[in-house]
Image (tube, grey):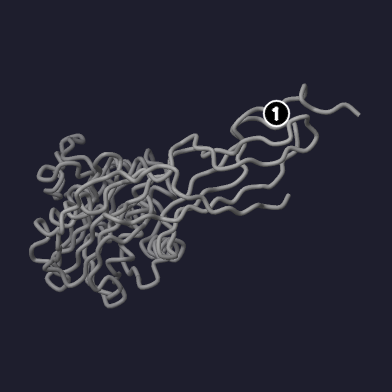
Amino acid sequence: MRRTLCTLLLLVMLLQWSAPALAVGTSAASAILIDADTGRVLYEQNADEPRLIASITKIMTALTALEHCTTDKVYTVQSGDMAEGSSMYLKAGERVTLEELLYGLMLSSGNDAALAVARCVSGSVERFVALMNQKAKEIGMEHTSFANPNGLDHEDHYSTARDMAALTRRAMENETFCRIVSTKSITIGERTLVNHNKLLSWYDGCVGVKTGFTKAAGRTLVSAARREGQLLIAVTLHDGNDWQDHQNLLDYGFSAFPRTLVLPAGQQVGSTQVKGSFLLTVPVRTGTALYCPLTAGEEPEITCHYYEAVTAPIAAGTAVGEAVATLNGQELGRVPLIIAQDVGLHMIRKS
């Protein structure tokens, strides 16, 4: 079936708001703020400059583990899992589940937990790091290299603010990851683990994700916050004022680029021909609502792609295309287009 292309004028008025003339900046060497749903960059500063990233590395460690192993797998801690720096204080010979290790990894930032996670999942740190780099390529992290699962300084271990935002965007799609990084504290056996991320208590709507620090990397931080259905992700590298900078960045994003209804669910965008039925055409509608982060005065173009004809019988809700929102040539989001009503057997012409 051929596709038909139409450009749809906005059929609803954009929400009106008074967007404050905010200026935002950071003390960071590199920074970025993105809308997680669309990937739109709302602020950036040296976002493609490779730098040491310290323990925000553990975002990749956790995501890699969750995608390659079940959380109930039991692991016996080895003496080689002991590591310098922050720790969840594992003891050689104790048996822990991968889920327990992930809490120690993301709340206590345990370098020992990182090594244990790697061996639990892959049998060796080297094989696990290979999986981390493989995942980085899959995500499109073009300026990233991992040399270990904990973020300790190494010449072959680096990333950028943009790459870490892309990684976090992917990680926040994982429900178990989100549950762990949003936990303020948890007691597991005799251990009480407290999350190092102060923004979970300080910032309304914060849902994660990870702190980091080494002397060479400085303070690194990735945060995520959700308000009124909008999820924002902020990343700063080598930032001595990161707690305040992240609050300022997130405030700026929510105020200046609110989640705006562009196309409602059930909006008719056209119709398509029906073959083999007394009905000549059937309406095509949006399957879900389309929201975009927009600042004052922005009006995205909505382009609809859908089949110019379908064949009966066909059920209501059948996907026949997509509506895509773009702004200045960059995609902001897309939603499915569906058949609006059933075209049943009783409507088919008899030969």
Asked where in the image residue 128 lies, by quadrant, the reply is bottom left
Please tell me which residue is depicted at 30% across the width and 40% down the height of the picture: 229
Secondary structure category for the residue under label 1:
loop
Give the residue at mark 1: 343
Q: Which one is nearer the viewer's eye here, 124 or 229? A: 229
In the image shown, does 326 or 133 lie closer to the viewer? 326
Left-right relation of 316 to 19:
right
Q: Is residue 31 left or right of residue 267?
A: left
- At 38% from the left edge and 53% from the top edge, which residue is drawn? 38
Disc 1 crowd rating (10 Å Cα; few below 14, some 14-19, many 20+) is many
The quadrant of the picture occupied by the C terminus is top right
User: 108 or 93, which lies in front?
Assistant: 108
Q: Position of residue 306 (x, y in %)?
A: 62, 48
Farthest residue to the top: give it: 346
User: Label 1 sits on what residue type?
Assistant: Val
- How far from the left and from the top, in percent, is residue 145? 35, 71
In the shown orientation, is residue 185 left or right of residue 330? left
Whether residue 106 is visible, yes or no, is yes
Is residue 274 left or right of 132 when viewed as pictured?
right
Residue 48 in percent (x, y) is at 30, 73
Q: Residue at x 74, y 35 (%)?
A: 280
